[in-house]
Every structure is written in structure tokens, then in C-alpha cells.
Amino acid sequence: QVQLVESGGGLVQAGGSLRLSCAASGSIFSINAMGWYRQAPGHERELVARITRSGSTNYADSVKGRFTISRDNAKNTVYLQMNSLKPEDTADYYCKIDGSLIPGKQFSSWGQGTQVTVSS
């Protein structure tokens, strides 16, 4: 089993910053891609940022230049540094981690979500 624990959400004024963290634990053999998604009320869940094991990243156009995803492989943790936050960034943010429990047995797990609210 894999457990993901997210932290770092909260209320911030427009222009402010927040840093989200997501730590994975359990019988993990390896972690491949790690990502952050968000879902605003009345909207579908969307990809915010993703990082591969080698460090390659991709971002949603709406957050490029403002958000930075990073990972600490030794700690099985992924981070999302969010700067210059806008009210439209308000959403529940979820981490997603893909990896393997043993060679050949893949898993894909979601965090419980952390709320980010940006006031204007």
C-alpha cells in the first residue's frame, strides 16, 4: 500500500506564495512520475505540473513562469512552489504519484487534496 500526505495549502492574498508538499510512504520500490493536479468547483480536474524521475517537467500554460515543481527522490516527496498567485488559482490541489511496488507491479496513487484559496 502507498500513502500520500499533502500539506501546505491555505488562504493567501493575490500576488502571494504557497508551497505544497506531498510525501509518499509504504512499500515503494521506485517512483516514476510525480504530479500536481487541481480541481475548482464546477470544473474538471486538470494537470498543473508534472515531473519525471529524471527531472523533466511540464506545466499547464496558465501556471508557466509562476509555479515550479520539484522532487526529492530520497524522501519520496514532490513539491509545488506557487508564486504570484491569482484568484483563478483557487482550487483543491491533488498530488499523483506513479511508480512500482515491486519490479513489474505498477501503482498510481492520489493524495487526499489540499485547499488553496487566493483572495483578490
Image (cartoon, helix red, strand yellow):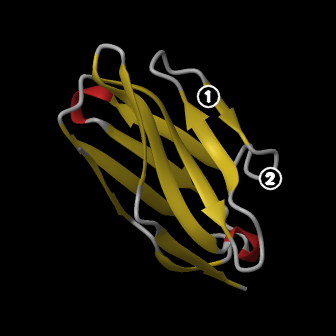
For numbered disc 1, what is the local secondary structure?
A: strand
For the view shown, which residue lies furthest in the front direction?
105
Q: Are marks 2 and 1 in contact (CB under 8 Å)?
A: no
Residue 91 seen in this snapshot = yes
For the view shown, which residue lies furthest in the bottom direction?
120
Which residue is denoted by mark 2 in the rendering? 62
Which residue is denoted by mark 1 in the rendering? 57
- Residue 51 horizontal side relative to residue 42, left or right: left
For the N terminus, give its image quadrant: top left
For the view shown, which residue lies furthest in the left direction?
27
Q: Amino acid at mark 1?
A: Thr
User: Where is residue 110 drawn, in percent x and y?
Assistant: 44, 52
Based on the displayed image, in which of its 4 quarters is residue 107 positioned?
top left
Based on the displayed image, in which of its 4 quarters is residue 58 positioned?
top right
- Residue 33 horizontal side relative to residue 22, left or right: right
Q: Amino acid at mark 2?
A: Ser
For the C terminus, give its image quadrant: bottom right
* Residue at position x 50%, y 21% in the image: 55
User: Where is residue 38 drawn, in percent x and y?
Assistant: 63, 61
Residue closest to the eye, 4 or 8: 4
Residue closest to the eye, 73 or 2: 2
- Residue 8 horizontal side relative to residue 18, left or right: left
Residue closest to the eye, 77 or 68: 77
User: Where is residue 14 drawn, in percent x and y?
Assistant: 68, 76
Disc 2 to disc 1, how far (Cα)?
15 Å
* Residue at position x 77%, y 78% in the image: 42
